Amino acid sequence: MVSSQKAKKVAADAVEFLEVLDTAGVIVDADNQVVNQSPKAKDMGLVEYEKVISPELVEIMNQARQTNQSVTLELFFSKNIRSPKLYVSARATRLSEELVILLVEDRTEAKRLDETRRDFVENISHELKTPISAISLLSEALQVAIEDPEQVKKFAKNLQRESKRLGSLVTKIIQLSRIQAGDLQGEIEVFDLGLIVDEAIELNQFLADSKGVGISSDTAKEILVQGDAGLLSMALKNLIENAVLYSDAGSNVGVGLAEVNDFAEVTVTDKGIGIPLDQQERIFERFYRVDPSRSRETGGTGLGLSIVKHAANNHGGEVTVFSRPNLGSTFTLRIPTYHVADNQKETQ
Ligand code: ADP
């Protein structure tokens, strides 16, 4: 009796500890009956009728009891078939002769990030291989055609296009991995978004002129925002660049700026090829292109919109699209405006 009271005291102390640790924890007695559990363990649904519901977890608790050593296991867990499957890391440790503590950590998000990272690296390798092998083939072709000036001209032009593509790909990969790591490149400052929009238009002017596409803008108003001006400039440059690239000669791209309900909205509208409805969500994924061969022709990387999306998210905003095939597209980047009161809130 005394020993069981002592055991309960140990269990209660341990659960107090668990609550501070913010971990799901369960303590069981010699019959694997749950003596105590932390709130996180309740949320996760580890226990039902005073038993740990997963046979694999019961097994590691038994092993820990028998061997007096910590036993760890990573596994998928869900409290029932309708609940989401979690990827968890569990550790069972003997606390006393009777008691075993089971700590379970939800690693679902970490695993998802790991997988995303792995996919990203695989995609990068694949994407880099295309221009690299094109450059290699073209340089071989140049050697063979050395006597034929017309052919040399043609291959040299293609070589230039592929190396430009490679350069743009590498730059965008670096930008994207920096943004994804939450590492905003520049300083956080308060600035007039109108000036950044004008700068992004300017950066695309040469491209637009050479494609015979006009850019008109309505940005002559001061709208203050807070964030990384360099990152937003890059995002807006990508949106305008796409609008130009996916438009035909003689067409016009419109860039607008407005303040709507404490948000600054930049809209980029084109009358170009448009995007099929069922692909409009996917275009923000890395390396996703509606028509890979057209995108390749325009020197696309499939990374531009992914950068825009991350830049918007990092500023507490979003990017949306409205588009109809053959009619055109409007992309809207929306981020919170800055008010002097925001600054006072921060310094208080
Ligand atoms: P890319 O470098 O290939 O343009 P993005 O990530 O910028 O990559 O865009 C992804 C895809 O979305 C493009 O390949 C293209 O199919 C589509 N897209 C983006 N912007 C437009 C637009 N303004 N009009 C039509 N399609 C677009």
Image (tube, helix red, strand yellow):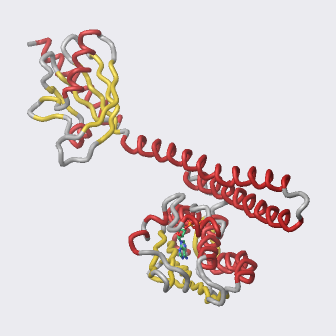
- Res 30 → quadrant: top left
Image-quarter location of ligand 1: bottom right
Q: Nearer the viewer, residue 272 or 347?
A: 272
Quick check: 92 above or below 106?
A: above
Asked whether, in this view, residue 204 is left or right of residue 309, the answer is right
Residue 348 shows up from this direction: no
Residue 59 shows up from this direction: yes
- Residue 242 horizontal/vertical position (percent): 60, 74
Q: Nearer the viewer, residue 155 or 241?
A: 155
- Residue at 58% x, 61% y: name it: 303
Q: Nearer the viewer, residue 172 or 259?
A: 172
Quick check: 277 above or below 144?
A: below
Task: Check the image and name the residue furthest to the right.
Answer: 147
Q: Quadrant of the N terminus?
A: top left
Asked whether, in this view, residue 204 is left or right of residue 321, the answer is right
Q: How many circles with numbers are drawn on the protein? A: 0
- Residue at 16% x, 34% y: name it: 47
- Residue 56 horizontal/vertical position (percent): 23, 26
- Residue 3 horizontal/vertical position (percent): 14, 12
- Res 159 → quadrant: bottom right
- Residue at 20% x, 23% y: name it: 58
- Residue 174 horizontal/vertical position (percent): 65, 53
Q: Nearer the viewer, residue 41 or 251?
A: 251
Asked whether, in this view, residue 198 is left or right of residue 70, the answer is right
Quick check: 47 above or below 128?
A: above
Quick check: 157 above or below 96?
A: below
Asked whether, in this view, residue 327 is left or right of residue 13, the answer is right
- Residue at 39% x, 45% y: name it: 109
- Res 272 → quadrant: bottom right
